[in-house]
Image (cartoon, rainbow, N blue to C red):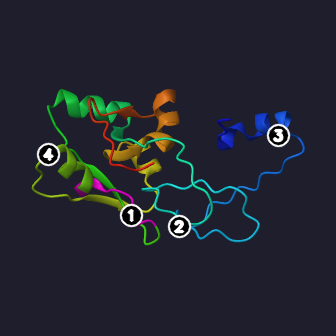
């Protein structure tokens, strides 16, 4: 059964006998402690605690506010020159960054300058640049039209 955080009311309606405690720790690689029945993690599936089941392969794609993406495309600006939004967090250093994405796509870029945030969603919605969007995180905003994917920019980096 697929359950999203926004789908908890439906889950409770179908399973009133179950309780779901949702915790979002500062790190996305928390150690499992007693009392945790299920943990949903992101990474390369190298966890050793308990039984691991891969839910899906993750994909990333540069995303931007629609007006920002349209402007960049109209001006002929590619990812080699687009304004980038970087995420830096001391707790989540294993998430891919622009360096990883551009290297995997073979896109040369002289400078990786850009704004740095530890939570970048508002910055991209405000049209400040292009961010790396993980399908599992950004797909709702893309579906709702708040963000648009960079054309032919989707890429898998071996995470799930």
Image point 53% across, 67% down: which residue?
27
Mark nearer the viewer, 4 or 1: 1
Report the disc number at residue 27.
2
User: Which numbered disc, 1 or 2, marks the residue that appears first in the sequence?
Assistant: 2
Residue pointed to by mark 4: 107
Which badge, 4 or 1, is on the more N-terminal residue? 1
Name the spot of residue 63 as percent of width and height, x first: 35, 39
The one nearer the camera, 126 or 96, is 96
Which of these two is toward me, 84 or 138?
A: 138
CA gap between label 2 and label 4 equals 30 Å
State the CA–CA distance, disc 3 to disc 4: 46 Å
Q: Which residues are magenta?
A: 92-99
Q: CA distance from mark 1 to mark 2?
A: 10 Å
For label 2, count other residues whose C-alpha is less than 10 Å away and answer few (under 14), some (14-19) or many (20+).
few
Disc 4 to disc 1: CB gap under 8 Å: no
In this view of the protein, which residue sits in the foreground, 135 or 86?
135
Residue 4 placement: quadrant: top right
Q: What label does residue 12 carry, if any? A: 3
Q: Residue at x 21, y 29 (%)?
A: 73
Q: Is residue 24 above or below residue 141?
A: below
Q: Residues within 10 Å of mark 4 (few under 14, many from 20)?
A: few
- State if disc 4 and disc 2 touch (CB < 8 Å): no
Q: Which residue is mark 1?
A: 94
Q: Is label 4 in a helix, a strand or a loop? A: loop
Mark 3 and mark 1: Cα distance apart in space = 33 Å
Q: Quick one: SS at disc 3?
A: helix
Q: Quadrant of residue 100?
A: bottom left
Relative to 129, 15 lies left or right: right
| Residue lying at the far right of the rendered structure | 17
């Amino acid at each position: 059964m697929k359950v999203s955080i926004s789908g908890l009311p439906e889950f409770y309606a179908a399973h009133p006998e179950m309780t779901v405690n949702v915790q979002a720790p500062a790190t996305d690689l928390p150690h499992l402690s007693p009392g945790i029945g299920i943990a949903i993690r992101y990474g390369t599936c190298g966890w050793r605690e308990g039984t691991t089941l891969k839910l899906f392969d993750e994909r990333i794609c540069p995303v931007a506010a629609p007006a920002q993406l349209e402007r960049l495309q109209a001006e002929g600006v590619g990812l080699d020159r687009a304004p980038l939004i970087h995420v830096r967090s001391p707790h989540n250093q294993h998430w891919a960054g622009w360096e990883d994405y551009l290297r995997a796509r073979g896109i040369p870029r002289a400078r990786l300058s850009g704004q740095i945030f530890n939570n970048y969603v508002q910055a991209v919605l405000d049209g400040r640049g292009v961010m790396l969007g993980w399908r599992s995180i950004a797909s709702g905003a893309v579906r709702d039209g708040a963000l648009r994917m960079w054309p032919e920019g989707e890429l898998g980096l071996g995470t799930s």
